[in-house]
Image (cartoon, rainbow, N blue to C red):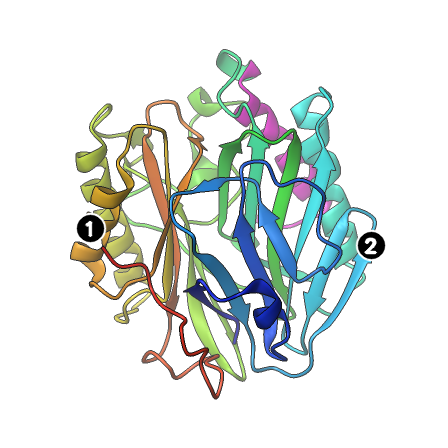
Amino acid sequence: MLTVQTTTLNRECLLDRPDVLAVVDFDANPGERPTDARHIVTPLAADTPYREVWTSPSGPVTTGTSGAIHYARTDSETIGSLILEDQGEDIETLAHRAYAELLAWLGQQNHQRLWRVWNFFSDINDGEGDDERYRRFSLGRHRALRESALPEQALPPATAIGCEAAQVFLMFIAGAAPCEPVENPRQISAYRYPRQYGPASPSFARAAKVNNAAGGALIVSGTASIVGHETRHEGDWRRQLDETHRNLASLTQRADVAAAPAALRAYTRPGVPADELIERIQGHWGRETPVIPLRGEICRRDLLLEIEGLWPLAAPGAIGEPESQPADTTAIRT
């Protein structure tokens, strides 16, 4: 089963390992796209030197490219990225193009089922009302998913964050079997939000279980201080964090997952202190919990942060763990 760790190990050393599907770096100005499909540079600034390494025990890793897609796969899963340059074209058009290309390509692969998608694009909160770029992006994504006949019950977890780079950047995970979506009883499903949030509701599940012969995981979407469909604690990042933790606890309880998270990402707007944020997150989930804090614009203007992660469905070490761990692979500590 695919799993993730945080590390400061040298990227080249990591890419030499036979079980590595992706090494994910973070850079607000990513520059030229790497030629190795397993090296993914997310266009966000990180407040720490850590990178993610995604590994799988499911056989040899093969890589390739197709159009705007770079990918790596094993017998059990595919992980990849899709990048479109944003030269001022309508974001709805770009979102539709990106998802249409991804879904058409997946339809020709063994791993046709989306398990997770990350979405990053610039100026996410620009525009008023239905002209806001996030709402326009959601509309383009919705059209592509509808054209592919993907039902709401099969939507994958997702995150959408604003970045500085002039691109539409998707990172994705896919498998042969469908994911099992998990919704939060404290929240309305995002794809059923009322009209006030735009002409098309955001198309994602709050979380999903994924399983194969090697084990399973709960993959959790970007989760924020929302109860029902309304933002709570506007302007107070500490209270928003507490509400976010309550939502994450509700999700993991609904999924019947008791294990600690294998890794977390915390996205924040400027002004949220990274050291205190990490201290509070690790105070809640455990001092050894790996956390990567990233700077970006949250999809709602009144939200200051959101958290996502991966939880094992079995005891730590029981799924997807390489036979020998890198000696200095470490969690972020305060």
The quadrant in which residue 142 appears is top right
Closer to viewer: mark 2 or mark 1: 1
Estimate the x, y position of residue 141 in percent, counting from the top left. Answer: 63, 36
**Tag 1 secondary structure:** helix
The quadrant in which residue 22 appears is bottom right
Q: Is residue 254 above or below residue 30?
A: below
Q: Is residue 313 above or below residue 145?
A: below
Image side of residue 193 versus residue 253, left or right: right
Residue shown at 76% from the left, 56% from the top: 35
Estimate the x, y position of residue 139 in percent, counting from the top left. Answer: 61, 29
Q: Nearer the viewer, residue 139 or 300?
A: 300
Residue shown at 26% from the left, 36% from the top: 273
- Residue 82 lies in the magenta-colored region: no
Tell me, yes or no, if residue 311 can be seen here: yes
Q: What secondary structure do most residues of the magenta stretch adopt?
A: helix
The three-letter code of the residue at mark 2 reads Ser
Dot label at residue 279: 1
Image side of residue 31 versus residue 44, left or right: right
Estimate the x, y position of residue 68 in percent, counting from the top left. Answer: 78, 46
Task: Give the magenta-colored segment's residue range.
Answer: 131-151
Q: Please give the residue where the numbered disc 2 appears in the rendered image.
A: 66
Question: Mark 2 to mark 1: distance in Å?
Answer: 42 Å
